Image (cartoon, grey):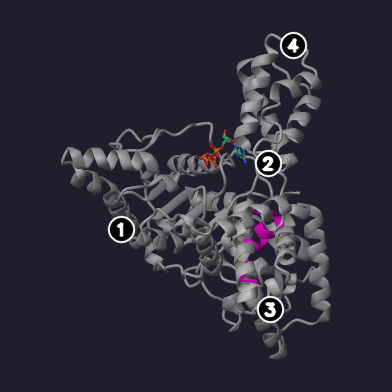
Amino acid sequence: MQMNLATAAGAFQKDGDAFQAGSNLSQAAGDKHDMRHDALFERVSARLKAQVGPDVFASWFGRLKLHSTSKSVVRLSVPTTFLKSWINNRYLDLITQIFQQEDAEILKVEILVRTATRGARPVSQEEALPQATETTPATPARRPTSAQSVASVAATTVASVQRPTQAPLFGSPLDQRYTFDSFVEGSSNRVALAAARTIAEAGAGAVRFNPLFIHSSVGLGKTHLLQAIAIQALQSARAPRVVYLTAEYFMWRFATAIRDNDALSLKESLRNIDLLVIDDMQFLQGKSIQHEFCHLLNMLLDSAKQVVVAADRAPWELESLDSRVRSRLQGGVAIEMDGPDYDMRLEMLKRRLDCARQDDTSLDIPGDILSHVARNVTASGRELEGAFNQLLFRRSFEPQLSIERVDELLGHLVNAGEPRRVRIEDIQRVVAKHYNVSRQELVSNRRTRVIVKPRQIAMYLSKTLTPRSFPEIGRRFGGRDHTTVLHAVRKIEELISGDTKLSHEIELLKRLINE
Ligand SMILES: Nc1ncnc2c1ncn2[C@@H]1O[C@H](COP(=O)(O)OP(=O)(O)OP(=O)(O)O)[C@@H](O)[C@H]1O
């Protein structure tokens, strides 16, 4: 699972690279900024970085570029509509202020979307599509018309926060503790959080990423984030009709409706929702249920209603799903979340303690114990929650918990779920050595049999031994498409099932890699 700061920052910047070439061209064609302005931009960037901190800067401003300048207007460009909207909403005043401190003549700063600025024509929000993330496949996003803007969703509630005048539809219960306020932000989830907030707040002019697909391994906050979207949307003045469901609940509800001959009215009630939030998508099963879901998805997306989905894997890896559902889910934006780092884990524990203190003000867990737990319980938010509950429970009859005692109590959680991290480079090195080829050959374009098979085995091992996504593995093998990796993994799986020699060979390679 990899959504570290660099990839998070890169996630919305895919077209940035495409622009690089364009930018040179446009400069050759006489872009209106000179060395003086470049230096000004550099100074402003440095001050901005100092002000917002390197993490935030890397996430949101890493690909901010100077586009053009006139006497009083500075135009900056970013690769995606999402970034433009984000910066406009949150940082434009600050950026303008810094520019003005550097050059008092500057009156205005404008942010443009880069791909669209290539032709020197700033595009409107409606024209610019949200760009795919690094984990988004090439399938082009559908382009809703401006009249279909998700930003224009109107409103009612469905789940637990209901407007009294509206009859509720249906939904899984929302946990009111799962809010944006209680969600700890960090480099591993910054992009997902930003996208989630944008959808929940979606006012006029909001950017559309539809469907938004959030994926991560277990316990990393998908449910928390999805519920936060639903809760916040329900609180908004626009009062959208929100349905939050787990895939299992959807299945159960549809199966019951079909059994009771009530499917029509259920479908009718779902027609009018504005925001559909579906959790644990990997559990959606059954041909007819998937057919219904596909129908609902098509209907909502076609009428530009927002859909948010979470699963434990990327949309194209949801192999049990009907290909039409999968394809529709791939048409939006997929964002992967990674595990929390130490600072995030510590912050999660502190927030939990603050929360617990609201019920019992005498509660206290010393800072050194909290940081010890944050350092050692690394697997996921869920393990951390378990560790915290253990501490709280124990503390009531063992008030003086020592670090040693904490280790004893939490032994089963320490480093749980985190086997030694295997790196793709290690896999490539071991496989290359074993098959007597070079690492360069493994990642090259050569398609001779002696290279292709080891390459496929290395890809297979990368998928099974690391949490990397198909696109990421593809990139690490010479920039190949994710479908090539998928094909390799399937091929090797198939071969292993009928070829004992190969299966032993792979077991041996696994042992060598893990040594
Ligand atoms: N960034 C975060 N900030 C605060 N709490 C978090 C964060 N990430 C995870 N948690 C907490 O960790 C616990 C597990 O998170 P959650 O249930 O949302 O994970 P999940 O990704 O949906 O897992 P699963 O795949 O098993 O459904 C929850 O109590 C959640 O509040």
Residue placed farthest to the left in the image? Answer: 261
In the image, 328 versus 416, the foreground residue is: 416
Return the residue at label 3. Answer: 20
Q: Which residues are magenta?
A: 1-16
Specify whether 41 is left or right of 184.
right
Say which label, 2 or 4, has the lower sequence index.
4
Question: The disc labelled 1 sits on which kind of residue?
Answer: Met
**Is 8 covered by the magenta stretch?**
yes
In the image, 30 versus 504, the foreground residue is: 504
> Which of the four quarters of the rendered structure image does ligand 1 lie in?
top right
Q: Quadrant of residue 29?
A: bottom right
- In the image, residue 348 sits, relative to residue 110, either above or below, namely above
Q: Tell me whether the residue at label 4 lies in contact with that at label 1, contact meaning CB atoms closer than 8 angstroms.
A: no
Specify whether 142 is left or right of 195.
left
How far apart marks 4 and 1 lie (CA) works out to: 57 Å
Return the residue at label 1. Answer: 299
Question: The disc labelled 3 sits on which kind of residue?
Answer: Gln
Return the residue at label 2. Answer: 418
Return the residue at label 4. Answer: 399
Residue placed farthest to the bottom in the image? Answer: 29
Count neighbours of disc 1 (C-alpha within 10 A) and say few if under 14, some if 14 to 19, many if 20 or more.
Answer: some
